[in-house]
Image (cartoon, grey):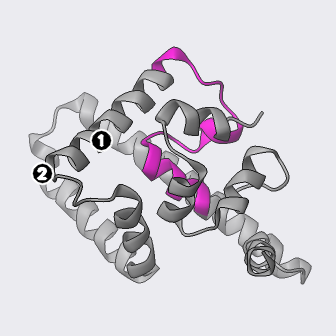
Amino acid sequence: MNNLKLIREIYGATQEQIAEAIGVNRVTVANWEIDASVASSTNREKLSIYYGIGPEYFYEKEITDEVKKMLQDTAAKAVAIVNRSNGKRNKEQEFHNIFESLSFAEAMNKYMFSMKLMLATADKGDLDKLRTAVLINEKMGKRLQAIIDLRESEQSSGEPSLEELLKEFDSKE
């Protein structure tokens, strides 16, 4: 199952906008949509942030009416932000800048600080929200473990990673 094109269309974005936001070229996005290649775990996470949904919807889960509404609402909020700024803001460029300027070490430091804030305020949170925070943390841990497993598998095989192959492919375009 490949929902990338459907998700992009529901959101109301072009392939060019998606490519700009996550730092790939338009052909790469097109190839993901027609199953000529698969988005890497890292790019799935970037898409997840962009669209405001979990990466499991790209290849694994069915797009329900609830997910469609979530995508439409997220897109409407992004348009409203651009409109309020009189066109001075560009979501795709802002996303691209975040991904280009933020190192993994910096992201890790922000994550650790965020977790410390949650722990420091946990006594103020109700039990349902605390349980939800634990579930989110477990799910994020599983996603990170999947990236680790894939990278270890690629390293032990001696073959170039999917990301390396896609960069090489993109540079030939």
Horizontally, residue 76 falls left or right of residue 105, namely: left
Classify residue 57 as left or right of residue 94. Answer: right
Position above or below: 39 against 163: above
Place of residue 166 in the rendered image (x, y in percent of width and height, measured from the top left): 76, 71
Residue 121: mark in rendering = 2
Locate residue 79 relative to residue 36 in the image: left or right.
Answer: left
Depth check: 57 or 22 in front?
22
The residue carrying pointer 1 sits among few (fewer than 14), some (14 to 19) or many (20 or more) residues within 10 Å by Cα, namely some
Q: Can residue 165 be spotted in the picture?
A: yes
Q: Give the range drawn in magenta.
A: 43-66
Find residue 113 and report its image quarter: bottom left
Q: What amino acid does circle 1 point to?
A: Val
Q: Which amino acid does label 2 sit on?
A: Thr
Q: Residue at x 42, y 42 (%)?
A: 52
Residue at 61%, 68% (x, y): give it: 24
The residue lying at 41 percent from left, 44 percent from top is 136
Looking at the magenta stretch, what is its main secondary structure? helix
In terms of secondary structure, where does tag 2 sit? helix
Disc 2, disc 1: CB below 8 Å?
no
Q: How far apart are marks 2 and 1 (CA)?
A: 33 Å
Quadrant into which the C terminus falls: bottom right
Q: Is residue 94 magenta?
A: no
- Relative image position of residue 19 (x, y in whole percent): 57, 61
Q: Nearer the viewer, mark 2 or mark 1?
A: 1
Closer to the chain start, of discs 2 and 1, is: 1
In the depicted structure, whether residue 114 falls above or below residue 58:
below
Q: Tell me residue 50's x, y (percent).
A: 44, 50
- Does dot 1 land on a helix, a strand or a loop? helix
Give the residue at x 81% y 56%. Answer: 37
Q: Is residue 6 left or right of residue 36?
A: left
Total marks shown come to: 2
